[in-house]
Image: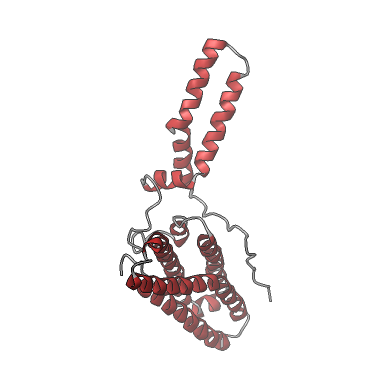
Amino acid sequence: MPEPDRYTPGEAPEPTPLSPEERRRMIRASLLRPLNLLVPVIGIVFFALTLLWWLPPLTAFTYAALVFLSFRDTTFQERVLRGRAARPTLDSPVSEDRDLSPERRARWLPRGETRQQVEAALVVYRKVVAAIEGSDEVTRAVLDDAIPRLHAVAGRMVDVAQQREQAAEAVQDLNPRTISNPERNHDLKRVEEELQAADAEISGMIEGLLDLRARVVRISMESESSARAAAGGLNRDLDEMNLRLEALESTLSSPDDR
């Protein structure tokens, strides 16, 4: 049996690749970015005044470097591809933009441990889906119901992570103001407990999805009757994951909401 991939803590997951159309738009926007165009303009002016031979290659190198950095800038990508001035704030509704892939939505999370764990789990999630879609006809048939459940798990995990970051931001902002407010102090403690529950669920998603991938491999090697029985258990576990994430969605809220 092929050994499933393992995620190494601290290993940065690969960013979501851009489509060819998105790449073309990003290249054009990077080339025409006003800040970048300012460099060749200044270089031409100084060259006309000084006639120094090294100014044109230096200008070209600087311009190329700025274009490359702009292309790799995730904030600039969101502004070009989504027409936003910046990443959506955490105060925006979690359900907004559900039509986007969970990987792209995860890139809106603040950089940190939560985002790293979510992105790593999404890498495994895509591998589980690919393992099902790339299996034989019988395996695909018995695991057909698992794919929408997997999509739901990925989407809800990102939703929980967004709510977790929103609540953590509110707790950090309100903590200094709770000294003389026992009631708010009690509410903040409850929210901090919810944050811990969200952290535990998100951190466990990687291993949970890796186990699911190993089970998909085993199912693909079994007879049809055994595969159907194993697929039923896999679907039940996916339903349980969805229920846990849904419960966190409904309970996790910021102190401001309370």
Query: Image quadrant of residue 179?
Result: bottom left
Query: Image quadrant of residue 92?
Result: bottom left
- Up the image or down, 144 lies above or below 11; here it is below
**How are the residues colored?**
secondary structure
* Coordinates of residue 206 in the picture (x, y in percent): 56, 70
Query: Image quadrant of residue 77?
Result: top left
Tell how many labels.
0
Where is the C terminus found, in terms of image quarters? bottom left
Q: Nearer the viewer, residue 111 or 107?
A: 111
Q: Residue furthest front?
A: 180
Where is the N terminus found, in terms of image quarters? bottom right
Q: Residue furthest left?
A: 257
Residue 148: in sight, yes or no?
no
* Coordinates of residue 248 in the picture (x, y in percent): 41, 74
Q: Is residue 251 left or right of residue 67?
A: left
* Coordinates of residue 62 in the picture (x, y in percent): 57, 29
- Up the image or down, 223 lies above or below 120; here it is below
- Up the image or down, 159 lies above or below 44; here it is below
Q: Is residue 188 left or right of residue 238?
A: left
* Coordinates of residue 146 in the picture (x, y in percent): 47, 76
Q: Is residue 114 left or right of residue 156?
A: right
Q: Residue at x 49, y 82 (%)?
A: 237
- Up the image or down, 53 lies above or below 66; here it is above
Residue 235: in sight, yes or no?
yes
Q: Nearer the viewer, residue 156 or 202?
A: 202
